[in-house]
Amino acid sequence: MKQEAIIDQLKVIVKPYVTDEQAFSNLTEATDFINDLKINSANLIDVILDIEEFFAIEIDNTSMERMIDVQSAVAIITAKLEAQ
Amino acid sequence: MIGNDVVDLDLAGRQSNWRRKGYLDKIFTPDEQHYILQAPDPDTVVWTLWTRKEAVYKIIRQQNGIRGFYPLRIATTHFENGTVCFDNQLFYTQTEVTATSIHTIALLIPTFDQVITLPLHQELFKIDEVPYVILDDKKHAVSKSHHGRFERVVGCRLSVVG
């Protein structure tokens, strides 16, 4: 799966939890889930569970620690998909 | 150093479904999950334990400056007295539960009698994203939390910085 395709899917996943629409429309790799998109940290768990379900991967606790921005999420998803 | 976290129970009920499959496993240790599931009011316990982790995380961030998402490593060591452990370091927490909100304050030394609630109009400054206020010409580290209808800014008289 190409990086752009992963980012596009990630946008679909995070959209329901985003509270800063402006930051969402300007989303880049550097976008931070909490600081920029203002996703509630309890909803970050939902983002992670939605990622697991959609991509059929398991995000282990060590990977979850880094799940704070688009760039890290894409890197983790890519690595998990490649390991399959 | 001080950390705090507030949850608007009404908003949390609409925003989060902690009963979702896999949800508790990502946040709570087996001991914590057991404590939640046997509680008469599991919602209150979920958000009490969650605000403790968030409040402690705010202190950890001030200590090491590293951001990350590791709620499982910030574990309750005593459910009643509110002590929490991270990497062998002990934190003290105090939680206020009302019908509409849950607010937890975390400290490294349990001097909760020195905690002050600051007015929301108090001017806040920041060093490396950590907020502080100036009281009597001294800089005091503070912690701010906002969720739904509630916003709380707390400081500790003993916590002088700079």
Image (cartoon, rainbow, N blue to C red):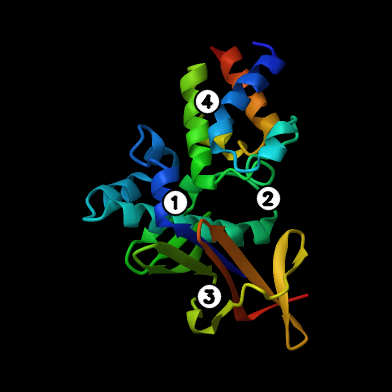
Please tell me whether mark 2 sits on a helix, a strand or a loop.
loop
Please tell me whether mark 4 sits on a helix, a strand or a loop.
helix
Label 2 vs label 1: CA separation?
29 Å
Q: Are discs 1 and 3 both within one chain? A: yes
Binning the other alpha carbons within 10 Å of mark 2 as few (below 14), some (14 to 19) or many (20 upward) gives: few
- Hey, what amino acid is under mark 3? Ile
Q: Nearer the viewer, mark 4 or mark 2?
A: 4
Q: Earlier in the sequence, mark 2 or mark 1?
A: 1
Residue B117 at x, y percent in the picture: 56, 77
Residue B128 at x, y percent in the picture: 77, 59
At 41% across and 62% down in the image, what residue appears? B101
Q: Which residue is mark 4?
A: A51
Residue B44 at x, y percent in the picture: 33, 57
Name the side, left or right, on which B141 lies relative to B15.
right
Q: Nearer the viewer, mark 2 or mark 1?
A: 1
- Pointer 3 indicates a residue of which chain? B
Above or below residue A76? Residue B4 is below
Q: Which residue is mark 3?
A: B109
- Hey, what amino acid is under mark 1? Leu
- Hey, what amino acid is under mark 4? Ile
Residues marked 1 and 4 touching at CB (< 8 Å): no
Residue B99 at x, y percent in the picture: 34, 64
Q: Earlier in the sequence, mark 1 or mark 3?
A: 1
| Image quadrant assignment for residue B134 | bottom right
- Pointer 1 indicates a residue of which chain? B
Label 2 vs label 3: CA separation?
22 Å
Q: Quadrant of the N terminus of chain B?
A: bottom right
User: What's the mark number on residue B11?
Assistant: 1
Q: Nearer the viewer, mark 1 or mark 4?
A: 1
Q: Which residue is mark 2?
A: B66
Binning the other alpha carbons within 10 Å of mark 1 as few (below 14), some (14 to 19) or many (20 upward) gives: some
Label 4 vs label 2: CA separation?
24 Å
